[in-house]
Amino acid sequence: MQSEAVSTAEEAPPPDWTALVVRLTSGDARQALDQLRTSSVVAEGKVCLVGLDAIRERLGPRWAGRREMVYDHVQQTLRRQLGPHGFFLRISEVSFLVAQPTVSRLSGQAYCLNCLREILTYFLGEAVVADIVVHEVTSIGEGEIDARKLDVVHVEADAAAERASRPFGPKPPGPQDRWSPFVSQDGRWLRASCALEPVFQLKTFGRIGYRLTRRVLPGASERPLTAEEQRHLTGADIEKIDFATLARGLNRLQQDTDADRQPSLILPVSYVTLSSQRARPTLVEFFRTAQSSVQRGLICEVCDIEGVPPSALLAATSLIRPFSLFMVGRLAAAPSASLAHLKEVGLNGFSIERPAGAMSDTEFADFARLVTTATRPAARGVMFFGLTSAREVAIASLYGATHASFALGATHAQPAEARALEPA
């Protein structure tokens, strides 16, 4: 049942906020909510309901067979984005309750909106405002929850203003630009450090151009965030990192007076950014600018593709394909199974970083074999990045790799003309 919400003394809600009553059917949910009912977080507006109604409606008859998969992904997304800030619980078929006692009311609501936006994009290919349905819980009673719908634009504008007004202290030293450093959703200063790494075609060992590599650094620290730490960042944070990487990399390429116009340039872009309607105009502008810096064209390296439905990946790659010569999918680790299901998603190849640390020839050969065996049914091209010796290049080529790069600092293994630029 829906009706107009009653304004509170603290803040008069926008007129399009509506009330909602959720009746609990799970005894476990009732028991878990007893603790919330006796705390102050509900009165402080720090408990929200994230709704999956749009996914259920879009899936239609398929919802019953796929909802467990949807629940698993929602839990993974909430766990990654919320981190230590709070906890969550599914309380109905399409509602997840999220409580965040350690952040402000607006920040917590913005987290929930970001989470739902990412979930909708994953399953539906886009997240229109009408489908982003998050409610603020106003009370928890015996067997039911009262809540009112949040206005997406209103909450995100207020949350951005709140973040801008926080006394973070002096900005960390270093070059300033529009995208880096920036304040993450959890209040940390983050900056992107970019390097240009030459990439070679293994058939001729001719250089095809450069790839942009990046590190994400907290504040003035030189210890980059690990891959696991980066997975805990929100979609909005990832967008800023992508844009900072592109801005810094293109600036370095244009300022390098010793380098001729490169044949091609590999630009890394996260799937989250590529599929974001909000980020798309900025991303296209970066690609248009980069096109003037290369002779042949751009190669878009789509990162974080693990678990993305093929249909969603195809939709995302189709949007940037007009600005790219080729599209490659970045793998986080050697696949354990064939990637044949990605054959028709618009990728011309795959790329992967060599695992860090010492590897014997046998260990590296096993790694190369796993990668090329898994990717061969989906695409012909496979790029191995960050190799440490000419011997590893030979092994990768033996198993079918088409392109490779050396790790920065491994210049002894490269031709003299293949000079890696130092990180910014």
Image (tube, grey):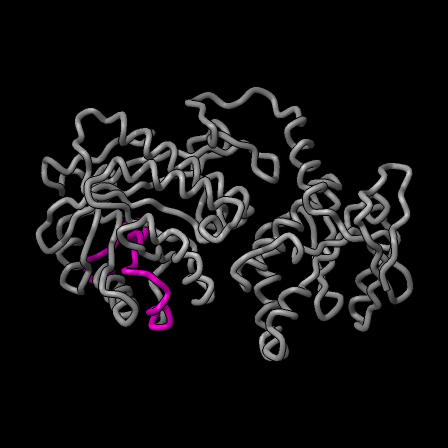
- Vertical relation: 278 (above or below) 203: above
For image coordinates 49% across by 52% down, the residue present is: 272
Residue 287, visible in the rendered structure? yes
x and y, in percent, of residue 270 in the image: 43, 50
For image coordinates 71% across by 46% down, the residue present is: 109
Q: In this view of the protein, which residue sits in the foreground, 153 or 187? A: 153
x and y, in percent, of residue 19 in the image: 84, 55
Quadrant of the image containing the C terminus: top left
x and y, in percent, of residue 250 in the image: 32, 33
Whether 349 is among the magenta residues is yes
- Residue 111 is left or right of residue 30, and the answer is left
For image coordinates 28% across by 60% down, the residue present is: 348
Q: In this view of the protein, which residue sits in the foreground, 25 or 297? A: 297
Q: In this view of the protein, which residue sits in the foreground, 31 or 2? A: 2
In the rendered image, which quarter is residue 259 located in? top left
- Vertical relation: 175 (above or below) 356: above
In the rendered image, which quarter is residue 28 located in? bottom right
Quadrant of the image containing the N terminus: bottom right
Q: How many marks?
A: 0
- Residue 84 is left or right of residue 383, and the answer is right
For image coordinates 41% across by 62% down, the residue present is: 314
Q: Find the magenta span and give its range.
A: 339-363
In the rendered image, which quarter is residue 166 located in? top right
- Residue 231 is left or right of residue 329, and the answer is right
Whether 390 is among the magenta residues is no
Residue 233, visible in the rendered structure? no
x and y, in percent, of residue 408 in the image: 25, 38
- Vertical relation: 110 (above or below) 317: above
